[in-house]
Image (spheres, rainbow, N blue to C red):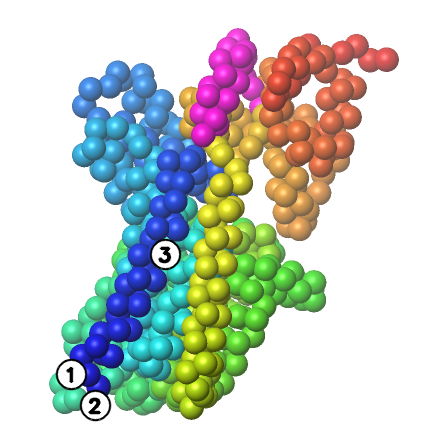
Amino acid sequence: MNLSSRWLPWLAALALLALGLGLRLYDLTDQPIDFHATRQLRGAIIARGMYYQMLPNVDDDTRREAVSFANSTGQYEPSILEYIVARTYLLVGGEYLWISRIYTSLFWIIGGLALFDLARRAVSPGAALAALGYYLILPFSVQASRSFQPDPGMVMWIVLTVYALWRWSGQKGVRGGGWSWAILAGVFGGVGVLTKAVAAFIVGGAAVAMTLSTLGVRRSWRSLQVWVMALLMIAPTVIYYASRQGRASEYFESWTLSLSHLLLEPSFYVRWLNLVQNLMGLAALLLGLLGVLIATPRLRALLLGLWVGYGVYGLFLPYQMYTHSYYHLQLVPIIALSLAPVALALLERLAGQTRFYHALFTGIALVGIAFPAWQSIAEFKREDFRGEPAYWQQIASYLPSDGKIIALTQDYGYRLMYYGWRKVALWPVRGERTLSSLRGSNKEFEDYFAKRTEGKDYFLITSFSQLNDQPDLKQHLQAHFPLIADNNGYLIYDLANPLPDQ
């Protein structure tokens, strides 16, 4: 192999990585409302609370309010990304929300670099380019991987863990070899699971598969390297959640046990598959599964571990599998790596064709890159959220200050909290009421309304689509309470002075 042919795949990979980074940084300064705004604004509120806590020159009332808002969001996992962003705010001298997009985009690119080298070693350089292209340019990947939430970082750590496991497996035939990669796999996996605990399913699946395929059952139990890897992967998260006083068990009971009956319903699996194929593309999903079957034995073992880990993960969190798209972000690198054996088979078949077919293939490949890239840019251009701060600040300025407010509003009240610096009690959206029904806690509406609004003086509505989705709420408010404000974008009902019975 001459020098140019050896470096050509790397140059192509760098071009793809540059394109992937450019797509993610497009429309950089728009507000983070484009993708799961609730989750992104939660991160923004926490980062701002940390920033104001560290900021030396700010009045105490503002500092306390920012910290109070951050604490009110709850803590699902360690606020690692939020802390990094807050530190960067302090370094650059201002709260620039788009900084988070730079970090998460870079996390995804680092994962892509590891994915390419893994696929290059496991399959071929050409097949690795196909895997990298899918990983970087899939529109769902572009949109989700730049969002202000821990998931892009979690995926980076998962890919780095899988890469280290592959390198460790390749060195086990060398006497005394593998220690450096074993430690790296443990550290990467441990940070990934600490970043977001659901990474444990994919990390665990990959680790078990590579360990058993490399050492077998008996030697795995006796290997000090395996025990060190396992300890490093598990210990950070165990230590963290042990200090959370039952948070993990509450989460398991709330999201797994209480919703386990969904596993017995065929519609659950249909909804799960439907969401996945909408996000990933049905052709890519099926070709990826085919790639598992035709992969070399070692790669097949790794891919099976990844797919099984993803499947078990879905069974533990059934509700999220058909309602939350970002819960499937870790499937992107799994499908990408699974596509590599299929790409190799195609490239080997193409190798014997004439230059005309080579040129035709190149043209098809370029279209396959350009079209989804254009889709991502078009989606960003379609909506502009730069007016959100002023809009919510205006609503906040009109809210009554002489009583407590409950609201049916967007994103758990986070838009009002982040942009308007106002915190309100929340009336559940339709999805939450449906989730409550799935958990078996149906209640009569009037009793439910009385309990939720107890001690509240005003009912604010800014989400009219949610109001229309809850006709019982709409009728009850109109029938029993006076409307005291009906402005562009919001309604306010007076709960303290109900209408006389008719």
Residue 436 is drawn in which quadrant?
A: top right
SS for callout 2: loop
Residue furthest left as drawn: 176
Q: Measuring from the top left, give residue 109's x and y in whole percent.
A: 31, 58
Q: CA distance from mark 3 to mark 1?
A: 35 Å
SS for callout 1: loop
Callout 2 amino acid: Gly
Q: Measuring from the top left, give residue 335's x and y in whole percent.
A: 46, 70
SS for callout 3: helix
Q: Earlier in the sequence, mark 3 or mark 1?
A: 3
Q: Quadrant of the C terminus?
A: top right
Q: Residue at x 39, y 44 (%)?
A: 26
Q: Residue at x 38, y 33 (%)?
A: 45
Res 122 visible: yes
Q: Residue at x 22, y 74 (%)?
A: 7
Callout 3 amino acid: Gly
Residue annotated with mark 2: 173
Q: Measuring from the top left, give residue 388's x and y in whole percent.
A: 48, 27
Please tell me the numbered disc located at residue 20: 3
Callout 1 amino acid: Gly
Q: Between residues 409 and 250, which one lies in front from this camera angle?
A: 409
Residue furthest right as drawn: 502
The residues colored magenta run 386-406
Q: Between residues 155 and 208, which one lies in front from this camera angle?
A: 155
Q: Measuring from the top left, give residue 38's x and y in whole percent.
A: 49, 39
Q: Is residue 129 above or below residue 105?
A: below
